[in-house]
Image: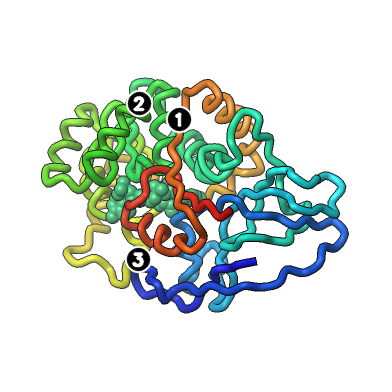
């Protein structure tokens, strides 16, 4: 198997020196195991956290170890009774071309209605993050206004579309005019805004005349600062991700805004609730697969994939995602 391993922990943005490529022989299959060919690797923002040894909800990848990641692949050989050669499966095989996995650690995919790659995006972890975070914490009501940034990505695009299905208004924020336009044209947001536009703050104010009831937090940074001025009494803020900070090496310049925000939490009776999607899996994953699967099959929830060819381009694509170079769910076509 060709593998990409962590060479050194990056300071700031990951670079060419962060990773190294090696080739290893895989072990012979034991009873209960399968040999997989990795077809697609998912690249996700959380991987930036795994490159760092700062304390987090999950352990970092060790220096010298294989990079972790969600994958879909094809069974090449099986010694597991429930899996046969040719099956398409979801696994957590990481940045490599082939893998030996315990059959119990992979899930066979039904690809009759949706392609296998959706199990890494709209019908996988990112889609579930949107579904659980928005419905369990955001709880949008008909007529309310929901705002989400990183809105072209797999989490944000699903947040906006589910908000619409629940009868709310959806305002999406993304980087650049093309993405902003695609939010309304391709994903049905009521408004799409470019957070890099000079007059972003004025555009946002015009887009939320009745204020904001749910701000699904994916990014933090200047977007949060602009959004928070418009939060309504009893607004809910599911805190899902802070991608604007992931490569940061120092606290932002300028006055400390925390006292002001805490004051707002108090006087506006805001609910600010962080979450890691895994906490909702046990209770809600089955409903998600059924409900979201139906929405996707009916075309009520659409998705976009951004597929990069070749494992050797994974590192560059990953660094690009943290700057907004991706348009849609970022995947690497491995083989
Ligand atoms: P995306 O595909 O949306 O990629 C991240 C996007 O963030 C970029 O494309 C870029 O889009 C945007 N971005 C980067 N820097 C900034 C910035 N400074 N200001 C505004 N936007 C920025 O990723 P996902 O949909 O996979 O993930 C979205 C968020 O959800 C992330 O924060 C991620 O960590 C979080 N997440 C949390 C989970 C949980 O359990 N809590 C689980 C899964 C994801 P643009 O061009 O629009 O700026």
Q: At 34% from the left edge and 71% from the top edge, which residue is drawn?
A: 12
Name the residue carrying label 3.
247
Is 93 drawn above or below residue 302 in the view shown? below
CA gap, disc 3 to disc 1? 30 Å
Dot placed on the residue nearer the N-terminal end, 1 or 2? 2
Name the residue carrying label 1.
302
Q: At 81% from the left edge and 52% from the top edge, which residue is drawn?
A: 78
Q: Residue 158 in the image: state x and y as whole percent.
A: 44, 35
Q: Nearer the viewer, mark 3 or mark 1?
A: 1
Q: Are marks 1 and 2 in contact (CB under 8 Å)?
A: yes
Q: Residue 47 in the image: state x and y as whole percent.
A: 48, 61
Name the residue carrying label 2.
188
Q: At 34% from the left edge and 40% from the top edge, which residue is drawn?
A: 148
Q: Residue 93 in the image: state x and y as whole percent.
A: 64, 59
Q: Are marks 3 and 1 in contact (CB under 8 Å)?
A: no
* 140, 104: nearer the viewer: 104
Q: Quadrant of the N terminus?
A: bottom right
Is 5 drawn above or below residue 317 in the view shown? below
């Amino acid at each position: 198997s060709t593998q990409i391993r962590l060479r050194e922990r990056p300071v700031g943005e990951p670079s060419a020196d962060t990773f190294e490529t090696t080739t290893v022989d895989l072990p012979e299959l034991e009873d209960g195991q399968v040999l997989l060919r990795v077809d697609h690797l998912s690249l996700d923002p959380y991987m930036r956290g795994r490159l760092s040894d700062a304390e987090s909800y999950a352990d970092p990848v060790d220096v010298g170890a294989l990079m972790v990641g969600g994958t879909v692949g094809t069974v090449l050989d099986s010694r597991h009774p429930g899996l046969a050669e040719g099956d398409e499966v979801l696994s957590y095989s990481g940045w490599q071309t082939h893998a030996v996995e315990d059959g119990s650690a992979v899930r066979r995919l039904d690809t009759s209605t949706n392609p296998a790659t959706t199990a890494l995006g709209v019908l996988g972890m990112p889609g579930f993050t949107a579904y659980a975070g928005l419905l369990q914490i955001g709880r949008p009501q008909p007529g309310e206004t929901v705002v989400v940034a990183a809105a072209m990505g797999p989490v944000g695009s699903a947040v906006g579309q589910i908000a619409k299905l629940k009868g709310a208004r959806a305002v999406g924020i993304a980087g650049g005019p093309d993405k902003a336009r695609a939010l309304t044209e391709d994903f049905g947001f009521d408004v799409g805004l470019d957070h890099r536009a000079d007059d972003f703050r004025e555009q946002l104010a015009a887009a939320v005349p009745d204020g904001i009831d749910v701000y699904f937090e994916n990014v933090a940074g200047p977007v949060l600062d602009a959004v928070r001025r418009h939060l309504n009494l009893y607004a809910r803020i599911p805190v899902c991700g802070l991608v604007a900070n992931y490569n940061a090496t120092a606290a932002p310049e300028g006055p400390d805004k925390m006292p002001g925000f805490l004051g707002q939490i108090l006087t506006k009776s805001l609910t600010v609730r962080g979450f890691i999607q895994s906490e909702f899996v046990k209770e809600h994953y089955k409903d998600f697969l059924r409900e979201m699967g139906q929405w996707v099959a009916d075309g009520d929830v659409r998705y976009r994939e951004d597929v990069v060819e070749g494992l050797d381009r994974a590192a560059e694509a990953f660094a690009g995602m943290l700057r907004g170079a991706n348009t849609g769910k970022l995947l690497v076509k491995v083989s």
